[in-house]
Each structure stands twice: as C-alpha cells, then as structure tokens.
Image (cartoon, coloured by chain):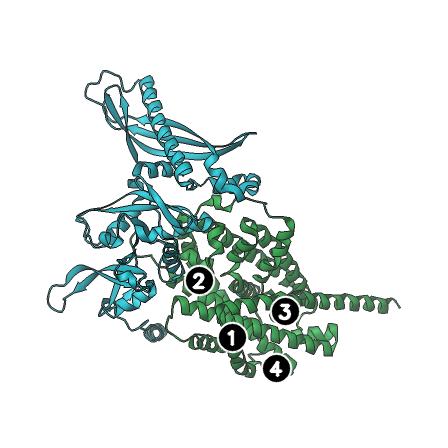
Amino acid sequence: MHKKLLSKLIIIFICSSILTSCWDQVEIDDRLFITNMGFDKPTEEEAQDPLNRYKITVGFRNQSGGMGTDPEVGNVTLSTVTTDMYTAERLLATRTNKSLFFGHLKVMLIGEEVARDELLFREVLDAVERNPIMSRKVSIGIVEGPASDALELEPKLEGNVGMFLADIFRRKDRTQKAPLIDLGEALITLHENGSALIPRIIPSSEEIKVAGAAVIKDYKMVGWLSATESNDITIANGQIQFITFAVPHMDQVVPLTITDGESSYEYVETENERKMIINIEMEGDVEMFYLNAKEDILDPTFLTVIQDHASKIIKESMEGTVKKLQSEFNVDVLGFDRYLEKYKPRVWREIKGDWNEIFPTLTVEVNVETKLRRVGLSK
Amino acid sequence: MYQNNEKVSTSQMVSIFILTIVGTGILTLPRSLAEAVGTDGWIVILLGGVITTALVYLMSYIVKKLPGMNFMEILTETVTKPVAYVLAGVFILYSLVLNSLLLRIFGEVIKMFLLLRTPIEVIMFSMLLTCIYLVRRGIETLGRLAELLLPIIILLNIPLFLLTIQGTNLSNLLPLFQTPVLDLIKAVPISFFSFLGFELILIFGVFYNKPELAPKSGVYTMIMVTLFYLFLNSMVLASFGTYQTRHLIWPTLSLFKTIEFPGLFIENVESVVMVVWVSIVFMSIAPFYLSKALLLAQISGLRNHNMFALPLLPIMYFISLYPDSMAATYEYLDIFTKYASTFIAIVVPILILMALLIRKGFGKEGKNA
C-alpha cells in the first residue's frame, strides 16, 4: 500500500518537474510591466520627417536595487517619436535593459491632437484591438493637451498615473462626472456607428482628474462635453447611481443623492414628426437641510415640492445636452440608433440610411420622475 | 488480445463526439453567424442542429442495423466492393485535408496567443506526435481520455463563462426574427459545418459496446452540442453586440479577454482558456487521425492500424503548411467543407441507407417467392 502511494508521489513529482519549464527565458524582475501608454503628435520640428507621426510615451514602475540594499521603486516614463506603436516598442527596447511587456497595460491616454486626426486615432485603436496580448479592459481617456503631460505626473495618492486612473475607472459607482468606459466598450460603440464618448482627462500641474468627455464622431474627436453634460448622457443611458446635486428651495439649497434609477426610451412617429421620449425614474435621499427648519421635512407635500424641482433640474439639463448633441455635434451617443434597431427594427430599416439627417430633427421629450425615499436621521 | 477488446461504452462515445464536434466550430461560429444573419444566429444554429441530428440518427441507425461491421464492411455490404474502395478513399482524403487545416489553425492560434517566437512547424509537429501516440493506442484510450477530459473542460469552463457575465447586455440579442427566411436558409451551411465531426459515427460505430443504443446516444450528443453552441453564441453576442462580433476573428477567445476580476489576480485568463482549448482541439484532431488510420487498415485488410499512424504524419504536416497565411487557410477550409463535407456527411449515409432499404426490399421479395 505504501509502495503504491510512494510510486504515485514519485510520478507526480517527476511529471511536475519535467513538464513545467520557463516560458521565454525572461525572469519576472527582468520584465518591465508597462502600465500607461500615451499617444501624441510630435512637435513641428520633429514632424518634418514624415516618418515621425507619433510621440509615444510609456510609463511603468521600476524596481531597482535589491541584493542586500533596500529596493527602490520609482515611476519611469519614456517617450519616443516614431511611425507607430510597434516600432516604438522596438525603439524603446534599445533604451531599456529589461524587456517590455504590454500584457498588464492599465491605461491608454490619447492626446487631443491625435484624437482629432481620424487616421491616427483609428490606427491607435486598431493597434490595440488587434494585439493578442493587451486586454480589452484597458481604461481609455482623451487628454486635454498632450498625453505625455498627464503621464509624467505623479498623483499624490498613488505615484503611478496608470494605477491611479485604473482605480478611478474601476470605481464607476463613485462618480458620474465622466462616462468611464474601458477600451472594449469604446471599441464596441465605435464599431457600431463610429461615435463614442470617451472620458476627458485633465492634468494640472500636480493633480490629474477625470471629468467630462470627448465626443467622437466618425472616428475622430469633434469636441468636449462638460462633466454635467456627460452626466446627463450617462443618466439617459441608464447608469443612474451616486449622482449628487443641489435643489434650490426658497433661500436654501437641498443636496440630494440619487441612489438608483432607470431610464428607458420610447419612439413615437406621427405624420409630421418623429419623436423620442426619454423616461427617467430616479430615487434618492435628502442629504441635508438646515437646523430646526421651519418646514417639516417629513411632510410628504414638502418632499413632493423638492422632488418635482429635482426632476425639473435634470429634465432641463438633459434637454440642453440633447439639443447640443443634435445641433452642435449631430452625433448619436445616446444610443437612439441601437434602441430603434433592437426594439423598432421595422422603423430602423426604413430610416437607417438617413439617420444622420434624421437625428438632428428628432423631437426629444424628457420625462423625469424623482422619488425621495429617505431624509437622514433628524426631523 | 488487446485488439479484440476494442469496445467503447456509450458515455465514452458521447464524450468523444462532443469534443470532436465542438473543436471544429467553437472559435469562429459566432462571427460567421453575426456576419450572415446578425442577431438571428440562434435560429440558424437550431436549424443546423436539427439537420445534423437527423443525419446522426440516420448514421447510427445504419450502425445499429449492421452491428459489428466496420466502415469497409458496411460499404461492401451495401454499395458493392469497388464503390466501397472509392468511397473509403474519398473519406480518407477528406479527413486528411480537414485534419490538416484544423492543425494549421491550431498552430496559428497558439503562435498568436502563447508561443510568440516558436516556429509554427514545431507547434504543429508536437501536436501531431502527441496525436500519433494516442492513435496507436486505439479507440479505447481515446474513449477513456474523452471521458476524462470532458468533465475537466466543463468544470474549467463554468467559472470562465460566469466571469464574462458581468460584461454582458442581454438587449444585444435583439431584434429577433428580422432576417428574411431565404438568408436564414443560406446561412444554414455555416452552422452545419460547425457540427462537423459527427460523420465519424460510421467509422467508430463498430466499436460501440451496445450498438442498439447508438441512435439514442447520437441524438443526445447532438442536442448537447446544439445547446452549447446556442449558449456560446448568445454569450458572445450579449458581450460584444453584432457589430463588434463581426470584427473579431476569434470572438470566443476575445470573449475571455474581457474578463477582469477585482484584485488583478484573475486578469488575462488566456492561459486557462488555452488549456481548455488545446485539449478540445487535441480531441478534435486525434479522432479524425484515428479514423484515417483505421480506414487504411480496413482497406488493406489488416487487423492492426498502428503501422498507418506514423506515415500519415508527413502528409498532414505538408498539407497543413500549404496555405500561405491564416486567411488562405480559412478560405481553403470554407471551400473544402462546402463540397467535400456535404458529400461525406449527407450523400454517403443516404447512399448506404438507400442500398439497405433496397436490399431489404429484395430480401422480402425473396421470402415471398
């Protein structure tokens, strides 16, 4: 019996030692795990050579030292000016003593100038989609100004910009100031109709923040949306969570937090107009009022007043944003086209060829209903 | 002694066929369907499933009616000896080419995802060598391996699919019933070809330890495969939507690239996916390989198929290296399956069945007289 067990163990041992081996002869500490990558246009001087099409910046965390001394961890950014992402990889390899690995890329930042150039922007997106090593979960953002500015920052809370932004992106439910999508989601909407909203990244001298969105139309950036406007669109798309806004009441403001909600579209066609209806139902809490308030906050009629006021604020803001999308950009990032395709396929088949002309002429009606459920601890 | 014992239980047979069939269609099916019929792919899968199930029933019926006969004996019995040789020859050629193209795709995928700098020749050659080892051991080993691998593959797959659920949007499955009937029918071959592999029933039929259960287990197998394809197609569409799916060469592999789990650990699960997929492909290539070796032995009247395993290797190796690129491989595969598979999977069984019925008819007349 013991012999049998022993022989089994020996077999397992032999198998595990013979069948495992090194993948590519690169030790893990000889690998640089690139976490951030940025694409910019080169300066005019550099751009005189037609092959200098991009300035590509990569960032990673490097550990040096060790071997008895305390290891030092630092953030390194390298940049190079070249034709494309893959040449950049080769060029950068000659400047590092370790091998570059893109499998753990966390964030991809695209400079405004590149995003506004259709060909360059499409090239960048294709390079990443085609790459079998990179994940589709990479966070993507468009930087106001050059991407390298954002990548060279060291945010106070987390030294590495890539990790910092990736953490922000992962906690979608904490903020609604930007449409936090990852590369995969951006690619999906771009494949669908060439348009998308991509988060706007604003670097300042010491800080970096994500707020608002870049509007992409026909694979190139056409303008910015402010944080509130991009918030309206996320609400219309049904991602309604943790939205805080203040409702003026008499001389006061009443801050509300929307905790949950739903949004749905409806399409109505009459003889002389095509109409989209956006129905939004939200529920939330009153966060504060003022001490010993005259009004009874538990009085349902009082709450109704606040609710209606809140609904009106959202409604007006959303109508403004929709108008802007229709008249200024003529870009359907609200997903009206996909809604029609999915739920009104017959209508869609008729109008899909002329969608670009029809979209700006749609009448859009916004209905918002707010329910305030809780008011905190005091009366 | 060991040759006389070549019997495979029903559950082993079911496992062999599930793995063989799934291996051919799993990678590209969602894309081809999205290209052809958009969101109505599920109808096409169902149609393809029904047709193949009927064919499988037909083939297993033949196996049941002529128990203990190998493919050559069945053919000789029904369509006379000369025709039998021709048909068996065609079958061998068919399986050679199909097998080699599968092998090439296997090599390309592995090179793309795992072994970036290994020559594709080495990847394919080592796969063939492993197959030979299995082929020389015969159907019994194949059956046992299938029975062993299937639960492991299913177990590994369940968490993988569960992890992809968070990124899905079920409204991507809409709209329903929007494709004209004619387009649906035109798309049926796509799903039909992802069910390829079932035609091996005629060859492996002789090894059933209970041939009378063959039709039932065959139908059972096809239902499982159809359900799996329906599930896979819906998952891919729900994650990517039709537009993105059309742009992915291997949507099934890309599906698993969308997995992200809090805590960085379970990111990039490609290696796990590859483990599953390599074993599925192996179980898809090996049975075809075995069927060739068996047929060659039957044609030459030998009892033992071992000696045919090795000589087939260089042939398959060169055929698989013939296409210039991956694009060419898929083009050859499309053209090839369109004609050869239709012949092998539809015409041959119907021929045999007709011959059976006619013979039966004559038999009755003889009795009456």
Going by the numbered disc 4, the residue's amino acid type is Arg
3D distance between C-alphas at marks 4 and 3: 28 Å
- Write down the residue under mark 4: B303
- Write down the residue under mark 1: B320
Q: Are marks 4 and 3 on the same chain?
A: yes
Nearest the eye: A365 or A183? A365
How many residues crowd mark 3 within 10 Å: few (<14), some (14–19), many (20+)? some
Going by the numbered disc 2, the residue's amino acid type is Ile
- Write down the residue under mark 3: B340
Q: Are marks 3 and 1 on the same chain?
A: yes
Q: Secondary structure at mark 3?
A: helix
Q: Residue furthest right?
A: B369
Query: Where is residue B196 drawn, in percent x and y?
Result: 58, 64
Mark 3 chain: B
3D distance between C-alphas at marks 3 and 1: 17 Å
| A358 shown above or below B164 | above
Query: Where is residue B48 drawn, in percent x and y?
Result: 61, 56
- Write down the residue under mark 2: B152
